[in-house]
Amino acid sequence: MKPLGPIPKGFEAIGGELAVGGKPVSALVEEAGSTPLFVYSRERLSQRVAELRAAMPERLGINYAVKANPYGPVLEHMATLVDGFDIASGGELEIVRKAGIDPAKVSFAGPGKRDEELQAAIAAGVTLNCESPGELDRTLDLAKRMGTTPRIAFRVNPSFEIKGSGMKMGGGAKPFGSDVDLVPEMIARALVNGAEWRGLHIFAGSQALSAEALVETQAKTLELAGKIAHAVGNPLPKLNMGGGFGIPYFPGDEPLDIAAIGSELGEKLAHLPAELGEAEFCIELGRYLVGEAGVYLTRIVDRKESHGTTYLVTDGGLHHQLAASGNFGTVVRRNYPVAIASKFTAEPEEEANVIGCLCTPLDRLADAAHLPRADVGDIVAVFCAGAYGATASPAQFLGQGPAAELLV
Ligand SMILES: *Cc1c(COP(=O)(O)O)cnc(C)c1O
């Protein structure tokens, strides 16, 4: 028997079934017309942002990192909740524009922006988080030819990273941002060329569950921003402090203590050095805002035994849930939170492996899980499916195609 990850709080049962947004899964599947599907809860999204706002200093803006979940209705709902949006491609620029989001609230990071993408972002008035001296040259050139003032922030490759974070994106040689010693000259060059300097972007990692590590990273981030602003000799207009707030996916993971982070940050923002005193501040979060609000539902199409092991074979799999299968940034495979959604309140009574429908041994949704007895037709829920699910999985693999999506 292997433990399952913790089911996020806020999910209820109706008539013994898992319910999302007040609807039991059988009704949700009927509404979508098929399985597999992703269901996102409007209420869970709103609640999450409200809790975060209550914990964070008022001065701190909250941005949504669109790549975590770019589904149109989710984005439109997030637009009513957050202060800004971070995108990472020209495609995401199109998506935020379709959702009716004001480009002035959007910043665009990413190490390989093409000229067409830079041009579209400059024309729209999006803030470009400049990743290198070469990208700055191209941006200034394009803006000059377009006769437009580009809005540029500078992404810094910090010399630190969040301790114990899931995905390291700072410290030492990195493809992201520019090394600290290059940045003051880049800012000066942007200013001389008439660009609007929109500040700094410092992102030091992802999926951290330790408040202590995040507090330490935020302190270092503020210190680094102060040093750079001092070297430039101009007050900093804005600091995007990155994010890295994680969610519990695996057995033993504990939720992040946001109250501790918020009170420490509140203290720091109340006692800023002069070069940071006028700055706007924001954090950018993806999975923390949307991850726990989503559930992936897939139907059991076969039940079989092999050498004494029970397999519940579903019509979903890693082509929609690469992360839950253990193949997206994890070294050792551990179980996500998984349940038999159509028998949500039933007691566990057997050990079973929940697998996907793909012809590969990698397609596992739960290993040796303790579950209620489930049969063909039952619906399995994989929780924590609101971020990096639908668009971070190889949906075209084996000709399967995408899953349906619903916001309820
Ligand atoms: C991916 C990414 C994020 C979002 O990360 P989460 O772990 O989903 O919060 C934020 N900022 C940058 C620069 C990113 O690349």
Image (cartoon, helix red, strand yellow):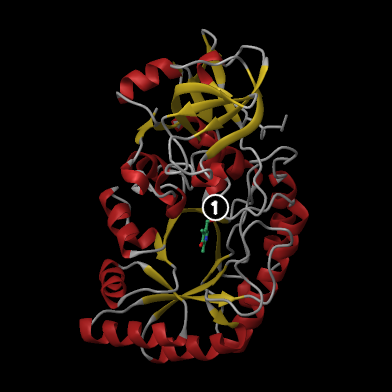
Residue density around tag 1, few if under 14, some if 14–19, many if 20 or more, within 10 Å: some
Q: Nearer the viewer, residue 271 or 146?
A: 146
Q: Quadrant of residue 242?
A: bottom right
Q: Quadrant of the C terminus?
A: top left
> At which x and y percent is residue 9?
62, 28
Residue 83 seen in render: no
SS for callout 1? loop
> At which x and y percent is residue 318?
47, 43
> At which x and y percent is residue 310?
60, 24
In the depicted structure, whether residue 25 falls above or below residue 89: above
In the depicted structure, whether residue 361 falls above or below residue 213: above
Q: Quadrant of residue 337?
A: top right
Residue at image position (41%, 16%) is 26
The residue at label 1 has a CB less than 8 Å from ligand 1? no
User: Is 118 placed left or right of 245 in the picture?
Assistant: left
> At which x and y percent is residue 339?
58, 24
Q: Provide the residue designation for mark 1.
A: 328
Tell me the kind of residue under disc 1.
Answer: Phe
Residue lying farthest top?
15
Residue at image position (72%, 44%) is 257
Q: Quadrant of the N terminus?
A: top right
In the depicted structure, whether residue 18 falls above or below residue 206: above
Q: Quadrant of residue 194?
A: bottom left
